Image: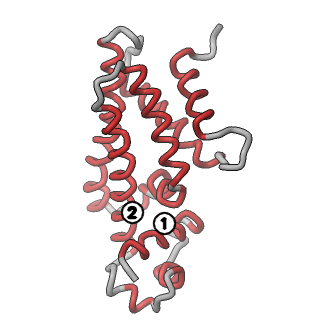
Amino acid sequence: MTRDDILDAAAQVFRQKGFHGASMSDIAAAVNLQKASLYHHVSSKQEILLDLLERALGLVTDYISKISNRPLPADQKLREMIRAYLTVLADNTDLSSVLLFEHRSLDKKSHARHVPRRDNFERLWREVVEQGVREQVFDCPDPRMAVRALMGFMNWTLTWYRPDGEKSINGIAEEYTHLLFNGLLK
């Protein structure tokens, strides 16, 4: 039994029951350990949550930073970032659910540790939007607000997307990109 096995199981338990609904006994049962044995690997549910959030942010940040650092026009970068982010969310539903829905369960100390990493991730997106404004590809008076809106509708996708549904994740990414770039008006 490795720490990664425990974190994988905890992510699944947190997705199913929520952080507050999940117990250390639930996590131990998911990896076939006694609760006391689980404490040899982790000290608390809060520690597990912070580790999962760091793992999730590390994963999405790695994918997005590789794209955002490429020498591409901003609109092409943003299109690729949207597709990559949605793909990572869809391919890692347990971990993504923890990232998107359980961060509010962090205690103050853990929250203070988490926020700079989250802000760094958001900064990657904002810099691409700002690049597009400089390149005169985007007309965006408030890149911070645009990124928050984009994050909102992409993150919410996790609540309704189904791999066997009528739309593929790439199709959804294209529709989101079209909506972001073109809006609703004719």
Residue found at the very far front of the displayed protein: 71
Q: What percent of the width, then of the height, locates residue 137?
A: 40, 11
Q: What percent of the width, then of the height, locates residue 176?
A: 57, 28
Q: What percent of the width, then of the height, locates residue 64?
A: 36, 39
Q: Which residue is mark 1?
A: 11
Look at 53% across and 80% down and name the residue there. Answer: 30
In terms of secondary structure, where does tag 2 sit? Answer: helix
Look at 63% across and 11% down and name the residue there. Answer: 185
What is the three-letter code of the residue carrying label 2? Leu
Query: Is the residue marked by circle 1 packed among few (<14), some (14-19), or many (20+) residues within 10 Å?
Result: many
Q: Quadrant of the C terminus?
A: top right
Q: In the rendered view, would you say 161 is above or below 30?
A: above
Between 62 and 102, the one nearer to me in the picture: 62
What is the three-letter code of the residue carrying label 1? Ala
The mark tally for this picture is: 2
Look at 46% across and 41% down and name the residue there. Answer: 85
Q: Quadrant of the N terminus?
A: bottom left
Judge from the rendering whether residue 113 lies leftward or rightward of residue 64; answer left or right.
Answer: left
Query: Is the residue marked by circle 2 packed among few (<14), some (14-19), or many (20+) residues within 10 Å?
Result: many
- First in residue order: circle 2 vs circle 1: 1
Q: Which residue is mark 2?
A: 52
Report the disc number at residue 131.
none
Between 76 and 15, the one nearer to me in the picture: 76
In terms of secondary structure, where does tag 1 sit? Answer: helix
Look at 37% across and 52% down and name the residue there. Answer: 59
Q: In the rendered view, would you say 134 is above or below 80?
A: above
Q: Are marks 2 and 1 in contact (CB under 8 Å)?
A: yes
